[in-house]
Structure formats: structure tokens, C-alpha cells
């Protein structure tokens, strides 16, 4: 009972009279018992006051040593095969959005001082980025695109399978990077992206697609398709399948200015999703 009284005394961080001589022999036991009581852990099975009488037969160490568990290793980043929307020739003609002179040379419009470019972001000529814009990682944007404000194209993501999720933390200590990617973000030619749109890693948005305002795009979008929502869902196709195939075959975004100017009739067509129109009948070489 004296020993039990000492256990309670230590757990309350004060000593009862008569316990002084026992502290050296029982202090660690008393402290651990006090911790159990402080956190409300059950003491059932440990004796009335968390102590039991020694039993030589039961106290023999007949246990089998536990097997050593292999430590999980950080998974290596696997390169995924990626088929670009753009040819090597096209990519070679794109302009670096981080380079002011390249932006000017490509006739790319927008308030450059409001753009946050981190990584390798390229764009084709005559694209308009009409407000605050973020591009991180590998980003490729086609010709004649129209972007609203607060558009974010992010080709990387934080890893969730590691103890830490902050990229800078692992970089500071020289650990395996806490970032992963599914591939570049690619925006096809003549894509219209509304305000406050986010496009995530590995997504390809096909030529002529429309992304509604406030959309989060987590998977690729077919050409000439209108999507919206978070996550993005298909709303409808802009044109019939026949017209979409003709548009892709024509690739008017590769025409020079003179040919574009000669094709006023083509560019002023009004087509519904059900029209099966012969585009080549109005195109002028």
C-alpha cells in the first residue's frame, strides 16, 4: 500500500509523507503509472494500483523475437509515355512566356507583369492571356488561344504518400522531391478558357475546345468540346463529328495571314452541332 500511495503521489507531482525512501526504487514505475492515469488509459489487468506480484513462471521470456519489418521506400518517379498535341516543328516555333522579347515577337497579348511563370511555359503566336495567369512546370499553349483572368496551368502536384507534403521542405534537406507529375499541361490551338480555370498535371485540351469559367480540369478534353464544372464534365460538342474532322484536317491555325484574309466566308460560317457541312467547299487556297 505504501508503494501504491507513492505511485499516486508521483502522478500528482507531490510526495506523501513516508515515501521519500522509496522514490529511488519506484520513481520510474510511479511516473509511468501517473502518465497512464493522466491520459485516462485503462488500468484493468495491471492490478489494483497498476502493479502486480511477480510470477516467475509467467515472467520467463518465452516469446519469439518479432520479425523485422522492411522499411517502406519512397517510390521512384516513373516516366509516363506522352504523345504531344504538337509536332516537334510546332514546338520549335513556340515562344517562351518568361521572355518579354519572345512574347512581343510572338504577338502574344496580355499584361505580362501579372503573369506568374515558373518552369518552361511556351505559347504559339497570337494567343491572348487577358489577366492574372499562372503557369508552373512544363506548359504548352497553342496559337490563337483566348484566356480569361486567373487561369492556372499546373503540371506538377504535391505527393501524398510521404510524411511531408511541402516541396520546399524536402528540397531544403536534400530528400527525394515531394512532387510528382503526370506530364505536361497542353492547351491546343484556338482554345477558349474562361475566368478562374485550373488545369492540372497531364491534361491535354484539344484544339478548338471551350473551358467554362470556374472549371477545374483533371482529365483531357477532346477537340471542339465544351466542358464546365469542378471537376470538368462535357456539356456538348461545338460541331458535328463530320465538321470536327474537317476542322482538324484543315488546321486553319497554321495558315498565314494572307490565306486567312482570303477565307472570309469560311471564318464567318455559323454552324450548329447538327450541321453536316462541307467546309472544303468554301475554303480558298
Image (tube, rainbow, N blue to C red):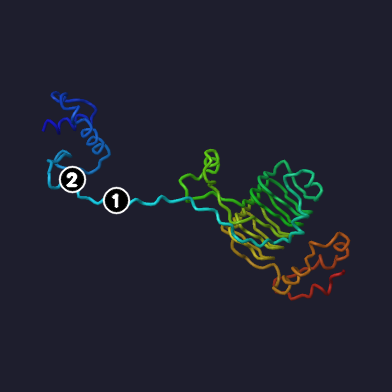
Of the pair 260 and 167, the residue shown nearer to us: 167
Of the pair 16 and 263, the residue shown nearer to us: 16
Q: Which residue is mark 1?
A: 66
The image position of residue 66, as x and y in percent, is 29, 51
* Tally of numbered tags: 2
Pointers 2 and 1 in contact (C-beta within 8 Å): no
The image position of residue 67, as x and y in percent, is 32, 52
Quadrant in the picture for the N terminus? top left
| Residue at 22% from the left image edge and 50% from the top image edge | 63
| Residue at 67% from the left image edge and 57% from the top image edge | 186
Q: Which residue is mark 2?
A: 44
Of the pair 185 and 133, the residue shown nearer to us: 185
| Residue at 71% from the left image edge and 70% from the top image edge | 239
Q: Quadrant of residue 182?
A: bottom right
The image position of residue 244, as x and y in percent, is 72, 70
Q: Quadrant of residue 183?
A: bottom right
Quadrant in the picture for the C terminus? bottom right
Q: Is residue 282 above or below residue 85?
A: below
Q: Is residue 30 above or below residue 154?
A: above
Q: Secondary structure at mark 1?
A: loop
Q: Is 45 left or right of 236, judged from the image as shown? A: left
Lower position in the chain sequence, tag 2 or tag 1 = 2
Estimate how packed mark 1 is, as few (under 14), some (14 to 19) or many (20 or more) residues with alpha carbons within 10 Å: few
Foreground label between 2 and 1:
1
C-alpha gap between disc 2 and disc 1: 26 Å
Amino acid at each position: 500500500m505504501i508503494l501504491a500511495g507513492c505511485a499516486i503521489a508521483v502522478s500528482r507531482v507531490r510526495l506523501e509523507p513516508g515515501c521519500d525512501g522509496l522514490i529511488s526504487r519506484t520513481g520510474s514505475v510511479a511516473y509511468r503509472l501517473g502518465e497512464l492515469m493522466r491520459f485516462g488509459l485503462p488500468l484493468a489487468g495491471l492490478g489494483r494500483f497498476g502493479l502486480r506480484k511477480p510470477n516467475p513462471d509467467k515472467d520467463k521470456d518465452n516469446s519469439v523475437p518479432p520479425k523485422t519489418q522492411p522499411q517502406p521506400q519512397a517510390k521512384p518517379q516513373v516516366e509516363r509515355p506522352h504523345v504531344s498535341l504538337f509536332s516537334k516543328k510546332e514546338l520549335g516555333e513556340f515562344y517562351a512566356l518568361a521572355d518579354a522579347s519572345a512574347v512581343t515577337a510572338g504577338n502574344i497579348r496580355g499584361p505580362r507583369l501579372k503573369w506568374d511563370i515558373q518552369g518552361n511555359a511556351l505559347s504559339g503566336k497570337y494567343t491572348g492571356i487577358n489577366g492574372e495567369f499562372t503557369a508552373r512546370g512544363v506548359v504548352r499553349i497553342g496559337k490563337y488561344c483566348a484566356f480569361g483572368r486567373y487561369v492556372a496551368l499546373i503540371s506538377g502536384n504535391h505527393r501524398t504518400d510521404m510524411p511531408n507534403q511541402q516541396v520546399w521542405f524536402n528540397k531544403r534537406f536534400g530528400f527525394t522531391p515531394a512532387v510528382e507529375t503526370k506530364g505536361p499541361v497542353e492547351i491546343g490551338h484556338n482554345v477558349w478558357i474562361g475566368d478562374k480555370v485550373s488545369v492540372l498535371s497531364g491534361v491535354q485540351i484539344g484544339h478548338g475546345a471551350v473551358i467554362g469559367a470556374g472549371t477545374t480540369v483533371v482529365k483531357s478534353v477532346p477537340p471542339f468540346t465544351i466542358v464546365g464544372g469542378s471537376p470538368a464534365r462535357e456539356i456538348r460538342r461545338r460541331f458535328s463529328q463530320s465538321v470536327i474532322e474537317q476542322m482538324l484536317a484543315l488546321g486553319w491555325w497554321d495558315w498565314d495571314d494572307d490565306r486567312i484574309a482570303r477565307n472570309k466566308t469560311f471564318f464567318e460560317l455559323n454552324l450548329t452541332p447538327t450541321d453536316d457541312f462541307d467546309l472544303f467547299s468554301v475554303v480558298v487556297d
